[in-house]
């Protein structure tokens, strides 16, 4: 999950998903599950405030949760 270190956003590198071997865990890009836009922060709609999304290695499909037809 990306976080603010006081000077800049720090993002983590892509990691393999432990529970679904054909998927990678990628950083959503939000800051600790919060999107900043306008005056008020709000929960990230892309990752549902988890800070991470999953990407299927072969197809490149991204999803909030791994699995489905791409298991």
Image: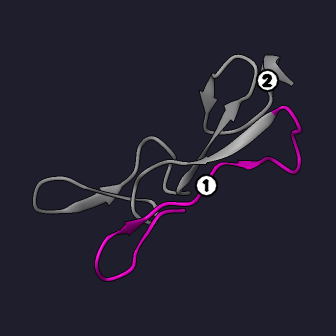
Q: Which mark is residue 5?
A: none
Residue 56 at what x, y percent from top left?
A: 72, 28
Q: Residue at x 79, y 23 (%)?
A: 68
Residue 18 at what x, y percent from top left?
A: 87, 51
Q: Residue at x 69, y 39 (%)?
A: 65
- Indicate whether residue 15 is drawn in magenta: yes
Give the residue pinned by disc 2: 68
Report crowding for label 2: few under 14, some 14 to 19, many 20 or more residues within 10 A (C-alpha). Answer: few
Residue 32 at what x, y percent from top left?
A: 45, 66
Q: Residue at x 43, y 51 (%)?
A: 29
Q: Residue 5 lies in what quarter of the image?
A: bottom left
Residue 39 at what x, y percent from top left?
A: 10, 61
In the image, farthest residue toward the bottom: 6
| 49 horizontally vs 64: left or right | left
Give the residue pinned by disc 1: 13
Which residues fall within the magenta stretch? 1-22
Q: Please name the colour scheme applied to the rendered image.
A: one colour
Secondary element at tag 1: loop
- Closer to us: 37 or 12: 12
Q: What secondary structure predominates along the stretch shown in magenta?
A: loop
């Amino acid at each position: 999950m990306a976080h603010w270190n006081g000077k800049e956003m720090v993002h983590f590198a892509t990691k393999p998903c432990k529970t679904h071997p054909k998927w990678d865990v990628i950083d959503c890009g939000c800051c600790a599950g919060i999107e900043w836009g306008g005056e008020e922060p709000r929960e990230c709609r892309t990752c549902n405030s988890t800070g991470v999304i999953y990407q299927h290695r072969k197809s490149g499909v991204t999803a909030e949760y791994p699995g489905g037809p791409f298991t």
